[in-house]
Image (cartoon, rainbow, N blue to C red):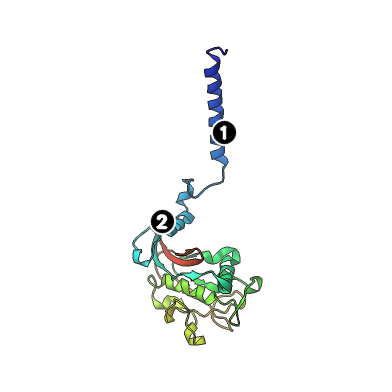
Amino acid sequence: MLRPSVLPRTALIVLILSAAVLYLDYRYAPSSPIFDRAYQQTAVLDAMWLQTAGATPAFAHISSPRFVLLGESAPLSLAGDVGHNVRAALDANNGALRNVTIRPGETWSFNASVGLPAHIRVRVVAGVPGGGWCDLASRYVQALRPALPPEAFAFPNHVRTTGIGLLHVADEDAVAIWNIDGQPGSFGGRQDLQITNTTNGTLRLVVVEGPAADQIVVRALRVAD
């Protein structure tokens, strides 16, 4: 039979050790965007908030503490060879297309974000290597149309250059992309999308999941003051 003083002392030791283990587990565990409060202040979580909120252009007034939603593209499927090429572009150059920042007065280039195409494995779609990149580039135009004037966009029009429209893209937003060397501009055989931030605020373009699991959309955000 234990003495009365032994059980409380043992329980106290166990309690102290358990508390220490829990603290160390919390202190050194990998950070989580859901449970780490410090992480909640980052741009990544704000973009996640916009995604989980299911915001669309019809709800552009919805904002996070850091960003204001300006516009959203039509969904783009990731199925088939086109989807393979879209994923390849989004993964290229350390995922530069997934999270774009355009500061006031800056001009952003789709081709420069993708980088040198020789390093990217793409599939041929309807005789075109990298078929689907035009569809992807057009989503950036769709997302920013509500926020920028027409002169802020520079790109060869897909309908005028090929005579073919793009699915779920208005003719005026259809971009023709031909990335030769990862350099910006539409000259010397290159076809590029360039967007100039003509506003006084910083713009963000983020790629998030679409309405279906095999879709993505591009969302345009303004960094809140």
Identify whether 122 is placed above or below 156. Answer: above
Identify whether 166 is placed above or below 121. Answer: below
Dot in front, 2 or 1: 1
Crowdedness near tag 2: few (<14), some (14–19) or many (≥20) residues, C-alpha within 10 Å: some
Report the quarter where the N terminus lies: top right
In this rendered view, identify the residue nearer to me: 153 or 125. Answer: 125
Report the quarter where the C terminus lies: bottom left
Question: As drawn, is 28 to the left or to the right of 57?
Answer: right
Q: Is residue 90 visible?
A: yes
Percent coordinates x, y for residue 92 in the rendering: 60, 67
In this rendered view, identify the residue nearer to me: 179 or 218. Answer: 218
Percent coordinates x, y for residue 132 in the rendering: 54, 75
Q: Which residue is mark 2?
A: 66
Kind of residue at badge 1: Val
Kind of residue at badge 2: Arg
Residue sitting at x 53%, y 39%: 26
Q: Which residue is mark 1?
A: 21
Residue sitting at x 57%, y 72%: 80
Question: As drawn, is 48 to the left or to the right of 3?
Answer: left
In this rendered view, identify the residue nearer to me: 67 or 200. Answer: 67
Crowdedness near tag 1: few (<14), some (14–19) or many (≥20) residues, C-alpha within 10 Å: few
Residue sitting at x 52%, y 72%: 109
Residue sitting at x 60%, y 82%: 127
CA separation, marks 2 and 1?
Answer: 35 Å
Q: Is residue 106 visible?
A: no
Percent coordinates x, y for residue 56 in the rendering: 38, 65
Q: Secondary structure at mark 1?
A: helix
